Amino acid sequence: MIDENGYRLNVGIILVNRQNQLFLGRRIGHDDAWQFPQGGIRSHETPQQALFRELKEEIGLEPRHVRILGKTQDWLCYNLPRRLIRHNASPICIGQKQRWFMLGLVGDEQAINLKASDSPEFEEWRWVPYWQPVHEVVSFKKDVYQQALVELEQSLIRYWQPHQEPI
């Protein structure tokens, strides 16, 4: 779904383990393309519904494996580099408009399955320190990663409160 300004509506997923490390996946066929799971919101979906669909498709996790710790208040946007814009598409997509969610892994990390869908996104994954993804993601996404991590950093406190209700 592309909005009136040319941004594709999208969810971003920051998955954190009990050591406050973040899941980072390497895109298939790209040796240096590490990123968080993310994906488009379909016209009939809420951001939370898209979150759980993308979580299952990209890394094989079900809602029971995670707890929603937080989400960004507003949409965060980035523009695609000019060379990546498909000018022959209609409507033209100039970038992504994302709602970011931080999820705490409450299930076993063995449940992570990069081949959960017919079209896998990632071929490898690893846990990394909290701020490392900002330094590894492609340059045009760095500001959005920084904004999401700054805003959601306080959500980690909820991860250590086992009886807290999810958002």
Image: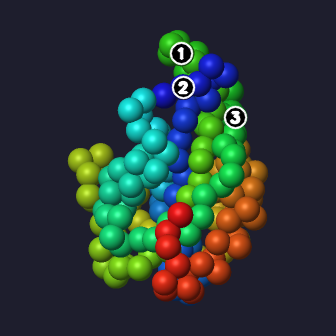
Give the Cα distance between marks 3 and 2. 13 Å
The residue identified by callout 3 is 79
- Name the foreground residue: 16 vs 64: 64
Pointers 2 and 1 in contact (CB under 8 A)? Answer: yes
Q: Is residue 91 left or right of residue 115?
A: right
Disc ID at residue 2: 2
Q: Is residue 152 visible?
A: yes
The amino acid on which the numbered mark 1 sits, given as a three-letter code, is Pro
Tell me what residue is drawn at x 36 percent, y 79 percent.
107
The spot of residue 115 in percent (x, y) is: 27, 59
The residue identified by callout 1 is 91
Q: Closer to the camera: disc 2 or disc 1?
A: 2
Give the Cα distance between marks 1 and 3. 15 Å
- Name the foreground residue: 102 vs 34: 102
Where residue 8 sits, quadrant-wise, is top right
The spot of residue 148 in percent (x, y) is: 69, 58
Relative vertical location of residue 20 with respect to residue 42 in this rendering, above or below: below
Relative vertical location of residue 7 with respect to residue 135 in this rendering, above or below: above
Where residue 43 sits, quadrant-wise, is top left
